[in-house]
Image (cartoon, rainbow, N blue to C red):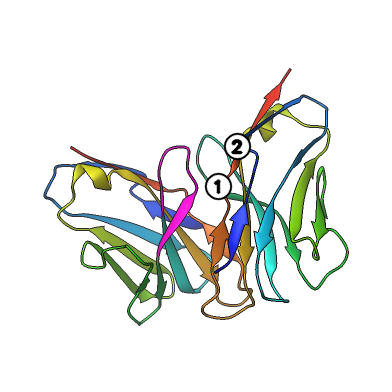
Amino acid sequence: GAVVSQHPSWVICKSGTSVKIECRSLDFQATTMFWYRQFPKQSLMLMATSNEGSKATYEQGVEKDKFLINHASLTLSTLTVTSAHPEDSSFYICSARAQRTYEQYFGPGTRLTVT
Amino acid sequence: AQTVTQSQPEMSVQEAETVTLSCTYDTSESDYYLFWYKQPPSRQMILVIRQEAYKQQNATENRFSVNFQKAAKSFSLKISDSQLGDAAMYFCAYRGPTGTASKLTFGTGTRLQVTL
């Protein structure tokens, strides 16, 4: 089956630093990838949609200068949280949409803790 | 905008029994897709079942089946012969017509407990 990986699975960083999260589709090509944020006991909130080779589309209320998204290839998208603050601590999930079948597959998530 | 509503924050079922999770949605589209996802404690999202709106027949995957009522915009999930491993958060999700702009809209989730 289609597999999406995320790295790292857990990261702790200091306030003011930046952290990058990678999302890879391992056995399929994904022209579109999605980034979600999930707070404890809540649903997934879509942050942005990234298309390979073009700028990401951010949802209303999401700061694009804070959450930098790059989708440089058909198998890799990255989310960089810049100048992280404790309120950015959350669970971040990526999802990749298969180019051929249009099915959407989810990564295992990354837990970010900002101290 | 499309909305997905799950009115049951928590549900409980005894092992081997049957439970139904409710979901309603709002859309003006005629062609769309509906999904149920399971999120266990590991937090990995797992697709349980999907339904295409143009199909009248309810989708079934082993112990999981749906009751899709298009006119009522209702999409409930029935879990038969519940197992301890079914304990998880369940999210109902809607996706519009296939296209580059289509994206999943999730409900708020239902936490399912399975008791012995």
Judging from the image, mark 1 belongs to the subunit labelled B
Mark 1 or mark 2, earlier in chain: 2
A39 relative to B74 in the view: left or right: left
Measured as percent of width and height from the top left, residue B30 is found at: 73, 76
- Category of crowding for the residue at label 2, using alpha-carbon neighbours closer than 10 angstroms: few (below 14), some (14–19), many (at least 20): few
Give the residue number, with chain letter if any, for mark 1.
B108
Residue A69, horizontal then vertical, whole percent? 30, 68
Q: Is residue A105 left or right of residue B47?
A: left
For the residues labelled 1 and 2, say whether their Cβ atoms are less than 8 Å apart: yes
What residue do we see at 49% from left, 65% from top?
A: A96
Q: Which image quadrant: the C terminus of chain B?
A: top right
Q: In which quarter of the view is residue A75 placed? A: bottom left
Residue A11 against residue A3 in the figure, above or below: above
Q: Which residue is mark 2?
A: B9
Q: Secondary structure at mark 2?
A: loop
- Percent coordinates x, y for residue A5 in the rendering: 44, 55
Give the residue at x 82% y 27%.
B16
Give a yes or no on whether discs 1 and 2 share a subunit. yes
Amino acid found under the numbered disc labelled 1: Thr
Range covered by the magenta-colored residues: A37-47
Q: Is residue A1 visible?
A: no
Q: Residue at x 75, y 55 (%)?
A: B75
